[in-house]
Amino acid sequence: MTLPAVQPLPEVLDALRERGLRRGVTPLPGEMVVPAVPTGHAALDEALATGGWPRGALAVLDAAPGHGATSLALDSAAASQAAGGLVAWIDLAGTFDPALAARRGVQLEWLLLVRPADGAEALELAAWLARSRLLDLLVLDLDGPSVPRFERLAALLPRSDATALLIGPSALRQAAGRVAGIRLRLERRAWLAVGGDLVGLRTSASVTRHRWALTGGHTELDLYFGEGRRIDPLIPALAIPERRSDEHLELPAEQPALVVLSA
Amino acid sequence: MTRLHATHPLVQVDTDEAGTPVRLRLAGETHAEIGICNRWRLVDDWWREPVARAYFKLVTRDGLLCTVFLDEIRGTWHLERIFD
Amino acid sequence: MRVLMLVWPTLRAMDVPTQWEGLLDRLDDLSPRIEALEEGVALVDVTGLEPIHGSERRVAARAVALAGMYPVRVGIGDNRWLASLAVRLARPGEIGNGAEARAACLILPAGEGRATLAPMPIGLLPTDQAVRDRFSLFGLTTMGQLAGLPRSAVAAQFGEAGERLQALARGEDPRPLVPRRRPERLATSARFEPPAEGVTEITLALRRAATALTDRLGGRHLAPGRAVLSLEREAASPLSVHLALPEPSTDPDWITRLLLARLEAQVRGSAGGEDEARITGLTLTLDRLTNPAARQLPAFEPQAGRWEELRWSVERIGARFGEGRLWRVVVDRPTAALPERQARLVEIGHEAGTHP
């Protein structure tokens, strides 16, 4: 591998990334090996180049409502628990949906549900929980008009081994973004539909900030809502994505087809 | 994953003659173009507080996917889930 | 059989499990055969109680009196179905003339289930709208009409579910009552003469009480999941401390220490000058008895050990931020039709000391 002797750094990094350089091959300056909490999506673990959410990071999921932030946070919680972790979900709005969370793989017996009085208390409780060093993932599901200060929590997290995932309205994400180690932008590309019903969404995920690796990582995620008695729980497992790498695979006609509508 | 509004906040819904929602007003925003994904009725608890709800799972042009229901006993519309 | 059904419509919404257990305990005075169907719904076997309590009206009035301060509906019938129907149709003013008269009550006459039901609308049967629509398609409007059809014809048109509904329409319900087992509890008391002023005296007496009770349990390979300490005070209302043990234990020192810590937190949190009142007596109660050896060892789960540690940290957090902040979620009715009823939250530090 030879590179021109003098080249602007961003271009060097782009060139390296084009060659598929990843952590574990040749660590780049600014790309460190850090222990991680799985995101629940292998493609996203890969796109983050850290094998998941780096421990100690405040990660902001930049997504407008309906673009999949809650689903992704939930999948990360389930994956973290499957790897033996404990998770706290800070549910300021009080909209945590236990039955669906359980259906999406969250083990409720290892989930601490926190109902703070306001945003400031939410962060204070998160800091206390982080300090216990017993948790792997803290989901900060924040809401409301007040914008608390994230600096203290962000400073505390690296010593806690926990990752904090923030979902919430735009003003909060902006405030947290200044101290966040990771920002992941989610944009819905399509609804995933079975017949006339929408059962999930396909979202593009772009890493717009990354303290431990290169930014610019990108992938597409299929997130299912796992909802309701109205939808057969087998459908996501049986559903055929619109584009597959193994196009030649012939599936029996009686399996329900997944129709991907345009968003 | 959905966000469950277990307290069922009131929403404003306009319907057509068949009782199907055509306009939804939620958090100060009006959603006038609505697609119905699914609908079902739920009747429960006949021995205490009776419950009769007509559910609609609907999607709006700007990408709000939610379930709302008509409380058939009180005649009020409520939000139950927002899909995110 | 005669079945009395009690429904407390507001109880479940309030989520008060300890009060629910207390209500069931009180009903034991009426009959030893009680089934707790769910929180807020109880069935009592009142067969042959007339010699003790008098007429069924008086049995119902007694049940209402025992049912506590919450609004309650009462029905009596020959079986579960008829009792539940009676509850549904109950109106106030049927029994008693004091406070009981406010409770809605209906007593369906014994042995006349079918005749009583005959004129009633078929819509009272517990089924969904689709079946009701089919009934009306066939011109069936009363339970008597359905009851009068040949069983084979009902089976052919409405299947097995239809047969069950026809049996109900005839006033038949073979489902038996499944009485709950009365939870065992052990208690011991001590009196202080003269009244105790220092914490040392209370600590010693509490430890003695805990040792006496746990000794009795240890021989039976049982351990309590909850400890309740009640203190009688001079010129002040009694003080009680409820402690759900993080895990069942027969270690008297541990139980004593946890109770004292909880007591201290409670006294510190209370306002007013009552803290100075001298203690005249103490009662320790241990309940929620389980066999610790029979519990599945949680060590197989990688999270179990850390979760226990977390619970201890959480107790500290609870003291710092107040109650109502830290919860665990239990999906106990995953198939409940209403999403808001599928799961409930249990506040950490207030749950039973059993591992999920």
Image (cartoon, coloured by chain):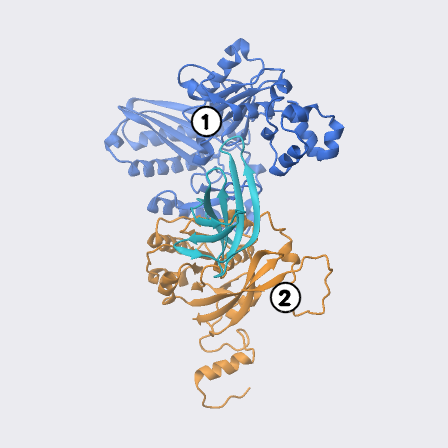
Chain colours: A orange, B cyan, C blue
Q: Position of residue A66 (x, y in %)?
A: 48, 59
Count neighbours of disc 1 (C-alpha within 10 A) and say few if under 14, some if 14 to 19, many if 20 or more: few
Does residue C74 appear in this view?
A: yes
Residue placed under numbered mark 2 in the picture: A242
> Along the horizontal axis of the image, is A122 left or right of A254?
left
- Mark 1 element type: helix
Residue placed under numbered mark 1 in the picture: C22
- Give the position of the N terminus of chain A as an image quadrant: bottom right
Residue lying furthest left in this view? C273
Q: Residue at x 71, y 25 (%)?
A: C149
Q: Amino acid at mark 2?
A: Glu
Kindly check if marks 2 and 1 are in contact, taking CB atoms under 8 A apart as contact: no
- Mark 2 element type: loop
| Along the line of sight, the residue nearer the viewer: B2 or C30 | B2
Q: Position of residue C316 (x, y in %)?
A: 37, 46
Q: Position of residue A60 (x, y in %)?
A: 43, 63
| Along the line of sight, the residue nearer the viewer: C247 or C213 | C247
Chain under callout 1: C
Residue B66 to residue C189: above or below: below
